[in-house]
Amino acid sequence: MARAPISTRDLTPFLAPALLDSADQSADAILRDKIGKAAKAKIRGSEGVTRRVINETDDQVREFYLRTIIYEEVRSPAWAAPDTLSDKTHQLLIIAVQGTRAALNASDGAMRDRILKRLKPARPVPRAAIEPFVGDDASVLHLSGVHTPTAVKPNSKSLTGSALEHALDPLGDQTFVLSAVRSRPGVPGLVDAKNRPASIGAAPGGGRIWVGRQKSLDDFVATMERVFLHAQTASTSPRFAMLAQQITDVSAVQGAYEIILTPKDLLSEDAVDAADFEFARKWAYDASFEVASPPPGAVPGLSLVVDCTLLGVSLGQADLAVTFIDGMVGLDLTWKDAATSSTKDHHECRRALTDPDIIKIHYESGHAIAQGRCYSSQYTDQPFDWTFQSFQGYDLEKEKPAFTKPQSLSSAIGTNGDNSLFAFVLEKLFVDAAGKPTGWLACDDGSMELADFIHLDPTTKIVTLVHVKASGSAKPDRQASVSDFEIVVSQAVKNLRHLERRPLGAELTKGKGKKIGSAVWKDGVRQKNRDDFLKAIGQLPDRYKKVAMVVQPRLTQAEVTACETLAKGNNRLLRMQQLNTLLLASRLSAMACGAQLVAVVDA
């Protein structure tokens, strides 16, 4: 039976285009032909699928140059044996060009993405061209996280409602970037059946919008005219300002002042290869990275100079080149002194600092690089209520006591002049009015630890999970550092979630037979083992009080006070705001687990 002629004017396409700009200033019919040729080259068979173009038509409707391509796909059903049955579907592509701007509309999203990948004649429009299509009364939101991947916070989330711009969490959601939204932006000429602004979807980072089914090709062109005009003329400011804003123009990014390494292996809920875990721990905990002052005459920008230190020993200085191409960050590291930088530690350091998935770089301009992209962020001005305590007599840069075999960590804590932060926890953190240690204290340090220490106050029935991290600096005038807090705070909250699912006593019994299981004290006096401590834990009421405590002396009371008087935009104040935001958001997560979050810093 002969196929009936296809009239493109009778098509009713769903309008959901990717908006494009010419890459070489080609325009109108020439740009349409270039994109059409590239698109047609992608419509070819692949494994298990046969594709064939059955209709290709060029039209000009007013100022729009159109190419309509209809093709068929034949494939075997996934549930059938090959060459026994076949499914035939038909797909539609419409390329619409006006001047140097184009739209690629595809009935098959996978084919659209396939065409856009490595498309040379045109590239997706900048984020600013899509932002006019983000309006009020958001009914659907898709958010992608730019924070450290962790078990206590989703990597992405989707929300539905009637006005979601009012439903976001100013603290918890500011580490997310807007991926897609459906809202009512008020595009002139586009209304719904009730004469309200039409509901339009937009994906600012992908250069896409979606409007809905069109009644004809003429309706399609009329809507595209309104879309192109709105993208070109509408004034806009980023909606959802509390969210992180992904940027594509990095000309204003400058003044790198902090590097943070946040390996996901340290926060994973899954089993992690021992070598990968050790690499992550080594470069997140044992290493420190200080951004050096730029040399005189240096051009402001993304790149920076880093002083690298491992276990207190300098590895030297390196140039960290940061590039930004097609919205993605590239990293390359060159050691200043090549002759002394060929050790295993130098190679590992380079590997860590050039991994865009684990590095964060903060800039004085208010921007941050995270997970291979660049963002501008807003930070709360609300202060966190820090707990100030003197660390006099203790080494702020030493987390644990040094020891040599056959001695163990458990026997080294608080003995032979130990002045580490572990000794501080034992001797100073939980004391009575006379300054003497009180309550039960057990060390649980290890790769699968519940916390560095667990403290039980038998009188108040409060259990405190203590997480300790050495300061990256002991200078009296040291400033706030987000990197010294980020991993340890995330671990503290993550381990609270463990106690939601598994009893505390059962978790502590697991480590009873390990060497660290003998590191137990009652009122400051070492015990033989955990037996009596476990009995005390077993007598706790079902709803005992929990505290997650972070011990990190990097922050000082003097710095907190000094930041209170600094003008907005000062980089010291910006660091303090970032730190306050991190702790306030983490405190909300702790409260959701029925716990308090306490941060002990230097008085």
Image (tube, helix red, strand yellow):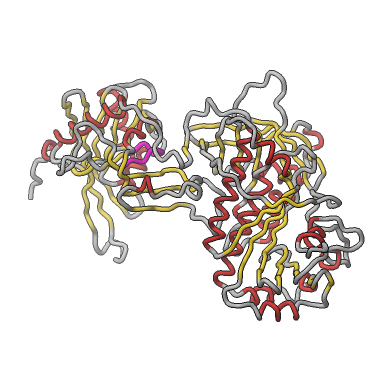
Magenta-drawn segment? 201-208
Up-down: is 128 above or below 206?
A: above
Up-down: is 398 above or below 18?
A: below
Residue situated in front as seen by the camera: 336 or 490: 490
Residue situated in front as seen by the camera: 111 or 258: 258
Up-down: is 203 above or below 503?
A: above
Q: Quadrant of residue 448?
A: bottom right
Residue 548: x %, y % from top left: 64, 61
Q: Residue furthest right?
A: 416
Q: Is residue 337 left or right of residue 214?
A: right
At 54% from the left edge and 64% from the top edge, which residue is drawn? 593
Q: Is residue 205 in the magenta section? A: yes
Asked if one can make out residue 599 in the rendered structure from this viewpoint, the answer is: yes
Residue 223: x %, y % from top left: 20, 34
Q: Is residue 377 left or right of residue 343?
A: left
Count of labels in the image: 0
Asked if one can make out residue 41 in the rendered structure from this viewpoint, the answer is: no
At 66% from the left edge and 69% from the top edge, which residue is drawn? 462
Residue situated in front as seen by the camera: 301 or 603: 603
At 31% from the left edge and 31% from the top edge, which residue is drawn? 35
Q: Residue furthest top?
A: 297
Q: Quadrant of residue 361?
A: top right
At 25% from the left edge and 43% from the top edge, which residue is drawn? 199
